[in-house]
Image: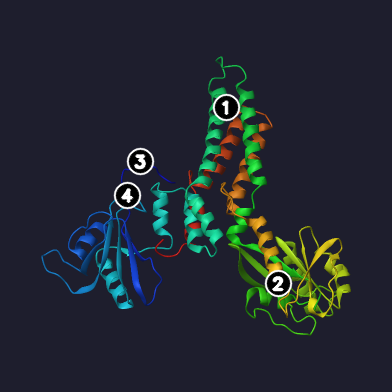
Amino acid sequence: MAGDHKGKAPPQQPGIYALATPAGRSAVAVLRLSGLGVKAAVEALVGHLPAPRRAVLADLSDRPGDGTIGEVVDRGLCLWFPAPHSYTGEDVAEFHLHGGRATVAAMTEMLGRRGLRAAAPGEFTRRAFHNGKMDLTQAEAIADLVDAETSGQRRQALRQMEGGLGAQFEGWRQRLIAAMALTEAVLDFADEELPAGVEERVARELLLLRSDISSFLGVQGRGERLREGVRVAILGPPNAGKSSLLNVLAQRDAAIVSTVAGTTRDVIEVHLDLGGVPAILADTAGLRRAADALEAEGVRRATAWAGGADLKILVGAVGDWTALYTPEVRSVVSPGIIVVGNKSDLGPVPPVWDGLPVLPVSVRSGEGLEALIERLTDAVGRLAGESEAPQLTRARHREGLFDCIGAIDRALEGGEAELRAEELRIAAQALGRLTGRIDVEDVLDALFRTFCIGK
C-alpha cells in the first residue's frame, strides 16, 4: 500500500543502484542509488557528504576509512538527496560519470563491495509508491512518459503525473466511504433512534455517484487511444494501391508492391505520428472472393483487423471502381470511413461512393496526399485528441470503474443492510485498487516489470 509519511523519512530498504542512462559507450553515464548504505557509499567514494541537492565535482575512489585513498576510478559529479526529500523517499544519490564501460563497471564493483545491489526494473518508482511519494496512477504515468513517442503522449503522461486522475478516483472513494459510514450506523444502532431518511439519503448519494462514474466512462476512450495508438485499417479490393499508400504514408517500403492481385496476405503494421497522436496503420489483404485457402486466410485477417480498427480507409482504384461493390468490401464499411479514389492521374474519380465523399489521390504523382494526411490527422485527433480533464489510460482503470458500478448496483437493489454494506466495501475496494490505496501486489508486479532499469 502507498504510505503517507507527512515529511518524515520512511524506513529504508537495502541499498540499490542502477544505470539510469542507456548501457554502452556514451559521453555521460548516470548511476542512481537509493536506500540503506547510500550515505556511507557517497562518503567513501567522494571523501565527504556533499550539501543536499548540490552537484559536487570529485575524484571518485574507494576509501577504506583508514585515511588511505584507493585508485581513482573517474572524476565526476555527485548529487546527494537525503530522505525523505528524494524521488524514492529514501536516501538517494546520483553519480554522473564518463560513459565508458570500464568506468561504469568499476563504479558498480565498488558499490557492490559497499553492500548495494543492482536494482530490479521499476524498483526506484516502486519504492517511491510504497513511501507515499505518488499513487499508482502517477507511477503508471511515469512509465508512460518514459515510453512516450509523440508529443501528445508526453503531455498526457505529464498531466497524469500531476495527480488529477488519482484525485478523481479518490474523491469517488471518499463519497463511498461516507455512504458506508451511514450504512454501518444503521447496522450498529438498529435499536436506537436515528435521523429520519438515512437509508434514502444513502440511496440518493449512490445514484448520484453512479451517474458521475457512468458519465465519466461514457466520454472515455481517448486517453487509451492516445497512449496505445489509434488503429487505422487500409481496406479495399486487390490492386487498388493499398500497399503503395501505406508505403508513401510511412515514407519507407514497408509493404511489397506488385501488380499481381493478392500479393498481400498478412496484415502489415507501421507506426505514424499524426499531429502528436500515435497511429498504427495497417495494410491488409485485398477483399474479394478468395481463390485459395491462403488468400481466404488473408481476407479473414483483414476483416478481423477492420473489426477492431478505430478508423478505416477504403481504397478504390480508377479503372476498377466496380470492385468496391462486392459483398466482401461492403462488409467492412462503417460510419466514419474515409473513401479514397486512387490512381486519379489515370482518370476522373467519382465524387461520391455509396453516399460517402471520395478523396481523389494519386500515390504515383502525389496528388491529394496532403489532403488525405490532413483528413487523417483531423480524424485521429478527434478520436484520441488531448484533453485537460483526467483521462483513463489503461484497461484496468475501465475495469475497476465497471466493478465499482456493479457493486453499487447490487447495493441499490435493496435487501439486508449487511449485504448492502458489503457491496459498498467491494465498490470502495475497486476504486482503491486503482490508486493503490489497498493491497495491489499483483498489479504492482505486472506494472513495475515494464519499467526500465533505473526508474
Residue assigned mark 1:
183
Give the position of the C terminus as an image quadrant: bottom left
What number is the disc on residue 6?
3
Tags 2 and 3 in contact by the CB under 8 Å rule?
no
Q: Which of marks 3 and 1 is nearer the N terminus?
A: 3
Q: Mark 4 is on which residue type? A: His
Which residue appears at 26% of the width and 54% of the height?
52
Residue for badge 4: 85
Measured Cα–Cα span from mark 2 to mark 3: 57 Å
x 58%, y 31%: residue: 421
Task: Write down the residue under mark 2.
Answer: 369
Residue type highlighted by circle 1: Thr
Q: Quick one: label 1, few (<14), some, or many (20+) residues within 10 Å?
A: many
Q: How far separated are the C-alphas under marks 4 and 3?
A: 11 Å
The earlier-in-sequence mark between 4 and 3 is 3
Q: How far apart are marks 3 and 1 (CA)?
A: 31 Å
Which tag is nearer the camera, tag 2 or tag 1?
A: 2
Residue type indicated by callout 2: Leu
**Which one is earlier in the sequence, the residue at label 4 or at label 2?**
4
Between marks 2 and 3 in the image, the one whose residue lies nearer the viewer: 2
